[in-house]
Image: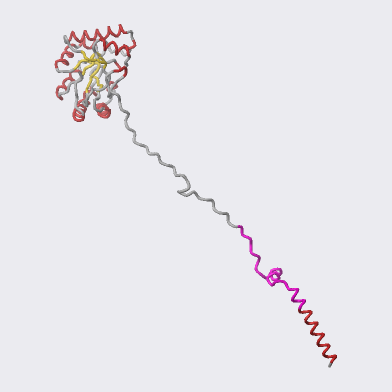
Amino acid sequence: MTHRAAVISALVVLALLVGGRWVLAREPIEAIATEQGLGPPPEATVPSPSPPEPTPSAASSPTPTATAVSPKTPKPRSGIGPHDTRRLTGSRKVALTFDDGPHPVWTPKVLDLLRRTGVKATFCVVGTEVRAYPALVARMIREGHTLCNHTWHHELDLGTKPEPEIRANLEATNREIRKAVPGAKIAFFRHPGGRWTPAAVKVSRELGMTSLDWDVDPQDWKKPSADAIRTRVINQARPGSIVLLHDGGGDRNGTLAACPAMVEELKRKYGIVLLR
């Protein structure tokens, strides 16, 4: 019995030694399984997404400020023309002026129209035309219109001449007017083409005449249609305007045709006054 017990005891000791070694030599189950390709793959390292680029917000980004654009207002036109010439009537009413006559065809028709509408105008007459048609100048005065010296022969460059030459020209024109109408008052001078110079204004003032410019020019001398002339005058006119028109210097059928409606509209909107 003693020998048998010793053998059993030895076997027990041996079993304990072998079991302990096995236990001590184990690796984690997950590591072994992975090593043998039986377990799940190791977690992939996924790079963290970069933070998104900050999107400018309405609060953080400056919003373009719309600049308020005010409607353009027409530049005010002065009542004083070049070299202190007169450009406005001085009242709300507008004035009509007719240049380059008298003309044997168009001036009588313009005078007829003015008489029918009860309107008075200023006629800027040319010396050579006055000599040719003195009766028309007499009619202008008889029907209550105003006369204006427009040089002897419509000399566009008169203002560039020496003062004695300017004076001689204007005096000759005034003499011719007074031959047609003795004692006629000649209140105004208008330089052809509006080509004013200090010398022309000075001489006319010394001769007792106001240099008369204009505020509205429909360019009827270019012979546009009657509708174009009327529209330009109405669109350009404002209180106190002096309107430039022509009764001489060529075919004035367009001007004559434009006048009835134009005159009525000007009368309604502003009234028409005679320059004095």
The answer to whether residue 179 is magenta is: no
In the picture, which quadrant includes the C terminus?
top left
The answer to whether residue 30 is magenta is: yes
Judged left or right of residue 2, residue 236 is left
Residue 204 in picture, x, y percent from top left: 27, 12
Residue 57 in picture, x, y percent from top left: 47, 49
Residue 239 in picture, x, y percent from top left: 24, 27
Judged left or right of residue 60, residue 19 is right
Which residue, as the protein is rendered here, is positioned at the far bottom?
1
In the picture, which quadrant includes the N terminus?
bottom right
Residue 54 in picture, x, y percent from top left: 52, 50
Q: Can residue 178 be seen in this view?
A: yes
> Taking 258 as reference, is 22 above or below it?
below
> Taking 169 as reference, is 63 above or below it?
below
Q: Nearer the viewer, residue 146 or 79?
A: 79
At 71% from the left and 68% from the top, the residue drawn is 35
Q: Can residue 223 be seen in this view?
A: no
At 40% from the left and 41% from the top, the residue drawn is 66
Q: In which quarter of the image is residue 230?
A: top left
Magenta residues, start to end: 20-47
> Taking 225 as reference, is 36 above or below it?
below
Colour scheme in the image? secondary structure
Q: In which quarter of the image is residue 218?
A: top left
At 78% from the left and 79% from the top, the residue drawn is 18
How many numbered circles are shown? 0
Q: Quadrant of residue 39?
A: bottom right
Which residue, as the protein is rendered here, is positioned at the far right?
3
